[in-house]
Every structure is written in C-alpha cells, then in structure tokens.
Amino acid sequence: MEENKELEKKKNINKMIIMMFLCVIVYNFGHPGTPALIEMRGWEKSVSGELLAFMSVAMFISSPYLGAIADHIGMKKLFIFMPLIYGTSQLFFGFVAQLPLVFIARVVSGFASGGTYAIAFGYVSQLSKSGEKAKNIAKVSSATVIGGAIGQKIGGMVADIDPRYSFVLQFICGSIVSIIILFLMKEIIHKKDKTEKIDPKKLNPFATFKYIKDLDNYSRYFCLIILLSGIGIYSYANALNYFLRFNEKVSSNTIGTFVMFSSLTAFFGTAFLLEKLVSKFKEKNIYKFMILIGIIFMAVILFEVKLDVIPYVIMAIYTMSYEMVRSLGNTIIAKRYKENQGKILGVASAVGFLGNAIGSLLSGHLLKMSEFLPFITNIAVMGIVFLLILFNKFDKEKIEKN
C-alpha cells in the first residue's frame, strides 16, 4: 500500500515536471521577438527593462499569494488557468499599440507566470521526501531551462517572419496546455484542507512581506541573498538580448539560437552536474562556489566584449552557473520547512522575481547609458552577494519544525 502511494507521488511529480516544461516553452515564444517589436513600434530602448520590471513586480506579488491559496484550495484548480491567462495577455502585448495597455498586459502575464512557478515548485516539493527535494526541484528547474531553450528557438524563427506572430502562438499553445493540465494533472488534497478555513487576511496579495517576516532568521537572510542575486543576474541577463539586437545587430533567429544553446548548457548544469554536486557537498557551499565562478566568468565576458568579441560559449556557461544558483536558492529555503510548500516556495520565488524586477528596470537604463554597464553592475552586485554569504551570522541556526 505504501509502495503504491510513493509510486503515485512520483507519477504526479513527473506529470508536473512535464506540464512545467510545456508552460515554459509557451512562455518563452515571445522573448526573442520582443526587441524587434519594440523597434517596430518606435519605443525607447529603456522600455524593454520597464516592461520586464512591471511583469516581475506582478510575479513578486502573485507568487506567494497564489502559492498560499493553492495550499488551501488545491494546486491543480489554480494551475489550470495560468497558461491560458498568460497566452491571452501576450496576445494583447503583441497587438495593442497603446503603451499603457501594454504595461497592463505585462502585469497580467507576470501574475500568471509567478503563479505558475510557485504552484509547480510547491506541488513537487509537497510530494517529495526531504532527502529528494533538492533533486526534484532541480528537475523542475531543468524542465524550465530546456523548455525555455525550445521556446526561444521556435519564437525566434516565428519572429523573423513577423514578431507579432510569436504572441499569437503563445495564446494558441497556452490554451492547449491549459486543456492538457485539466485532463492529465492530479489534485493534491490534504485532510486539513477539508476543515481549515481560509483567513482572507492571511491571503492578501500584498502580504508578501508578511510572509517573509514569518520565516526564520536564516530564511529571511537568504531571501536577501536571493533578492540581490536576482538584481545582479537580471541587470545583465535581461539586457543581453537587447544588447545583441541593438548594439550588435543580431537577428531574432540568431538570438533564439544563442538562447537555446545557453539553455541547453544550463540544462546540463541543473539536470546532471547539480545532482552530482548535491550528493557530495552541502547546498550552501555549492551556492557560494557558483556565485564566485559566475563573477569570474562575467569578468571574462566584459573583457571580451570590450575587445569587440561576443563570447557566446562563455555567456552560455555563465547562464548555467546562474540557473544552478536559482535552483539551489529555492532548495535551501524549502528544506527548512515541512508544510505550506506552495507559500514557502512562493516567497522564495517572489524575492527572486523582485530582484528580476529591479534588475530588469536597471538593465534598460544601464544599456542606454553604456553597453558595458550591465556587465559591470552584475560583477559589483554579485560581489556583494558573495561577501554576504561568507559572513552569514545565521548559518548555524536550526531548521524550523513547522
């Protein structure tokens, strides 16, 4: 009987990984064509970062909120709607020329994206044994990486025909993925869900900071590290496609091919290399090492770019290092808690999304000031992150038993 339960849990975990893979394919169709769409509309380059910032702020708000709701009413019930909502909002993004409406569309897509990640990570973490959380969360991260690679490549090819077509594709495929989730996914139902009433005050979409306050000292400190890591990573990462398009005149298809290659490299890191490292070293030590390696790679990238060379391979390896960092950040916090995984991982994702928002907002303006500033900012911020990890006074704090 117990074996059947464990087998069923593994099947459900694998189904969620497949669904997350499909979601992220769809969510990435629009990225390669976005710079061309901005050019077509005649908007300022800095708009790219501002749009990403609005989306990321929405992800910051929605991730713990929808994760907490999913813990109470069921994760499938919410997850079904995420791809459909995302695809619909992207259709507006691709075809509405009025900038205020475009910003609203990005907020809606951010809300759906944040919910997608929180629910997927929470679902898998809830079904995983403590010793398997890192491995299974890494599998979800791997699915998002490889899905992103495929989505970016397909989106790049479609955008070369017309950048707006990739957003139509998001709507069509998002609707299809929602239907697949409806028929394929199984709901997670806990006994307490039948009797525990939802306190509206606890499920406030603007209560993310309260959720963070509820964490133990170590988790709160690590949330700060995740936040700063997000700022450092995305001040570079979200400027990269626009740097290649505006400064190096690279086509949407070539950008999609490069991102696919980078994502495949990251997939190797999260799916294989990270699993090997976690079996031999502590997650916190791996996190620290990958931050240091990332700083070194970024310094080399900056040096090469100043020589008018685009170091595609080194950029791809750097992508691998930061995807491993993102996966480990979620795992380190998740392992400290036994329940409410949707909310806990929603909080971990939320602070990452807030870092994404700040980094995205900076990226466009940094690129506008100087093509080298996104790279320099990354090195500076990640250097601060490395020092914070070295001097973490909460490192020995015991794990909470909630």
Image: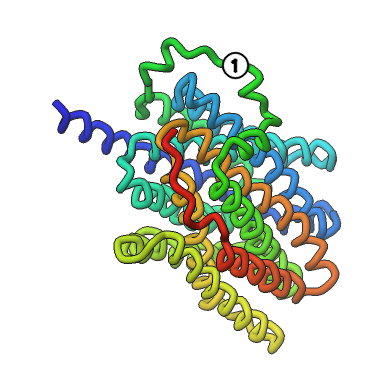
- Residue 279 x %, y %: 30, 61
Where does the image place residue 223, in percent across and percent down from the top left? 60, 50
Left or right: residue 233 compared with residue 395: right
Residue 237: x and y in percent read: 64, 63
Residue at 67 percent across and 53 percent down: it is 355
- Quadrant containing the N terminus is top left
Secondary element at tag 1? loop
Q: Nearer the viewer, residue 215 or 98?
A: 215
Q: Position of residue 88 (x, y in %)?
A: 63, 33
Residue occupied by mark 1 = 199
Give above or below for 261 relative to 135: below
Q: What residue is shown at x 35% (from left), y 29% (from top)?
A: 184
Can the viewer see residue 83?
no
Q: Is residue 329 above or below residue 235?
A: above
Amino acid on which the number 1 mark rests in the picture = Asp
Question: At 68% from the left edge and 48% from the top edge, which residue is drawn?
Answer: 354
Q: Residue at x 71, y 64 (%)?
A: 242
Left of 34 or right of it: where is 197? Answer: left
Q: Nearer the viewer, residue 320 or 167?
A: 320
**Residue 11 is at least partly visible in this image:** yes
Front residue of 9/51: it is 9
